[in-house]
Amino acid sequence: MATRCLFENSNEIGVFSVLTNSYCVVAIGGSENFYSIFEAELAEHIPVVHASIAGCRVVGRLAVGNKNGLLLPNSTTDQELLHLRNSLPDSVKVQRTEERLSALGNCVAANDYVALTHTDLDRETEELVADVLGVEVLRHSIAGEVLVGSFCNFTNQGGLVHPMTTLEDLDELSSLLQVPLVAGTVNRGSEVIGAGMVANDWSAFCGLETTSTELSLIESVFKLRDARPSALVNQMRGSLIDQLS
């Protein structure tokens, strides 16, 4: 299900949060209303961690992660690093990178299998993305924009990209990522998809301005209608098999 919310009057939900299939990181200092929306949807299945990065609340633009790991900029303090390592599941690798393009969330977009990166990203950072996130790394631009993390959002189910992406680019990206992609907008016409929303395989959160048409497209392409966490599906499948046998 896709949910609309606001972070302190801002519709840019992707700026203040990171959402994956194994954890969610949200900025500190938001309203209880904002946290309760996330926790109502996610807390039963994955930890919702309140954190800052380099003393800033724009955690979604500074960090990039998937179910396997979380990559942080060099400016992250030791205390913040320790807090995240203690709060996230043991299976998640949390690591800092020396990358000069320190807004990693703007420069990298990833699901659990593949990552798109800024074309000028350092070779060491590319190797670190592959190692920490456990993904195949592709250097690419979207609709001529090198900030791939800002202009697209994709999960293991599907993805949304910049509305000016050509059909050829869309087909190429779709075959590279092996997920269906659609060009669209969030927050009533905003093309900054990555900053405007966050999503995982069973839920998505976008700004309050998002229109019903945009919301419907998000639920359709990310396959969120009746979607459930894989752990819950496996549990239900197990109990159903037990009943049948």
Image (cartoon, rainbow, N blue to C red):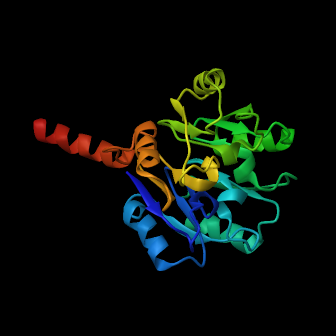
Q: Is residue 233 left or right of residue 184?
A: left
Work out which quarter of the rendered image holds the C terminus and state it: top left
Q: Quadrant of residue 81?
A: bottom right
* Residue nearest the observer in this picture, 154 or 87: 154
Residue 30 in which image quadrant: bottom right
Query: Which is more toward the observer, 122 or 10?
Result: 10
- Residue 38 position, x and y percent, is 45, 65
Residue 27 percent location from the top left of the image: 61, 70
Please report the residue visible at 60 percent of the width from the left and 29 percent of the height from the top: 177
Residue 104 in percent (x, y) is at 74, 52
Q: Is 183 left, or right, of 35 in this rendering? A: right
Where does the image place residue 159, in percent across and percent down from the top left?
53, 38
Q: Does 18 sit left or right of 5 as displayed? A: right
Is residue 137 positioned above or below 102 on the image? above
Left or right, residue 41 beside residue 123: left
Q: How many marks?
A: 0
Q: Is residue 128 above or below residue 55?
A: above
For residue 217, above or below residue 65: above
Residue plotted at (57% across, 74% down): 8
Residue at the (45%, 60%) spot, across then down:
4
Q: Is residue 201 visible?
A: no
Q: Is residue 98 visible?
A: yes
34 shown above or below 155: below
